[in-house]
């Protein structure tokens, strides 16, 4: 209880203090409960992981499909032509992905889907509202029937 | 509030325990009603289903070949809807469709997504059904079984 100079009880009504305390308690409890419910549904960067793997394994993206074998995909082999000349990330890999940005680094060259979005979000992707995932793949690549091995790095950022 | 402004504080001291008791009752009332509303809410169910089915659909797009997935969970009391840009799940709450939970999907260019809504009309809210997710070179589609 706050006392003034004459040691009399302050005229601040007790019920105002009580209501303020009550409001703080109620808000705190609801915040804790809501945070825990959302944590139950948290999927982290799972979606970004799936999109990263799509780049390597789907023939619409970088995966090599052999025309001599009825366009059968050879898993783990990427097509140099799809990466370099067509930039398949933009032309056939992703559609309606306004909220994602993808970057692939192959032989020291960068290839993007939604480059502006990627450049904007990548520096702040550590925030809880965004997902971020990067993975290196050792791939066999085909360049005009010549095979070689190379590491390709794929990073995905986006809204959760 | 005359009783609280008593200079000697006599009445205030007598009323303080009573006020504390009233506030404790209010807090407990709030807590119980809040817990009840959460237990009756469909928020968890619809968001879980949207994410689970959505991620399964996204996973099919990794596959280089055609794929059929028999979704391992029975859908009960919920409406599933898939369009080109997102998947939505609405759960029946006392025979009325509740708010939807969305999962935005990222499509492959040139791969057509067939629109799907099930159940389409009211009155089938008690129905339990299974889902089949199919992906081939040209399209991604959902079916019931």
Image (spheres, rainbow, N blue to C red):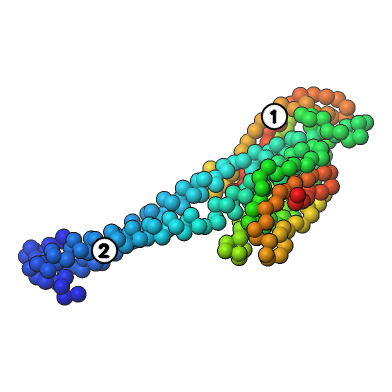
In the displayed structure, B2 sits above or below B98; it is: below
Residue identified by numbered label 1: A137
CA gap between label 2 and label 1 equals: 64 Å
Chain that bears disc 1: A
| Image quadrant assignment for residue A86 | top right
Q: Residue at x 78, y 48 (%)?
A: B140
Residue identified by numbered label 2: B22
Q: Is residue A88 visible?
A: no
Quadrant placement of the N terminus of chain B = bottom left
Q: Residue at x 65, y 33 (%)?
A: A135
Chain that bears disc 2: B
10 Å crowding of disc 2: few (<14), some (14-19), many (20+): few
Q: Nearer the viewer, residue A142 or A71?
A: A71
In percent of width and height, residue B72 lies at 68, 42
- For residue B115, side relative to residue B48 (left or right): right
Q: Nearer the viewer, residue A85 or B43?
A: B43
10 Å crowding of disc 1: few (<14), some (14-19), many (20+): few
> Which mark is on residue A18?
none
In percent of width and height, residue A87 lies at 78, 42
């Amino acid at each position: 209880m706050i006392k003034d100079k004459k040691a009399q009880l302050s005229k601040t009504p007790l019920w105002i203090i009580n209501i303020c305390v009550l409001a703080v308690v109620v808000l705190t409890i609801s915040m804790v409960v809501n945070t825990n419910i959302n944590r139950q549904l948290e999927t982290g960067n799972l979606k970004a992981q799936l999109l990263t793997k799509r780049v390597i394994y789907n023939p619409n993206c970088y995966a090599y499909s052999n025309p001599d074998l009825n366009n059968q995909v050879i898993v783990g082999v990427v097509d140099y032509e799809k990466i370099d000349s067509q930039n398949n990330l933009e032309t056939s890999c992703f559609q309606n992905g306004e909220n994602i940005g993808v970057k692939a680094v192959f032989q020291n060259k960068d290839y993007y889907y939604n480059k502006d979005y990627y450049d904007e979000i990548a520096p702040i992707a550590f925030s809880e509202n965004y997902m971020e995932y990067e993975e290196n793949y050792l791939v066999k690549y085909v360049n005009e029937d010549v095979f070689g091995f190379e590491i390709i790095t794929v990073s995905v950022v986006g809204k959760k | 509030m005359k009783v609280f402004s008593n200079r000697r504080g006599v009445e205030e001291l007598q009323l303080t325990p009573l006020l504390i008791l009233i506030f404790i009752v209010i807090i407990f009332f709030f807590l119980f009603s809040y817990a009840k509303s959460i237990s009756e809410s469909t928020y968890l169910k619809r968001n879980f289903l949207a994410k689970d089915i959505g991620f399964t659909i996204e996973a099919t797009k990794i596959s280089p070949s055609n794929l059929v997935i028999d979704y391992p969970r029975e859908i009960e009391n919920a409406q599933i809807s898939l369009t080109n840009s997102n998947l939505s799940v609405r759960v029946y709450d006392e025979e009325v469709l509740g708010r939807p939970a969305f999962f935005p999907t990222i499509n492959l260019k040139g791969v057509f997504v067939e629109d799907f809504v099930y159940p389409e009309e009211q009155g089938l809210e008690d129905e339990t059904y299974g889902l089949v997710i199919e992906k081939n070179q040209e399209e991604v589609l959902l079916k019931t079984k």
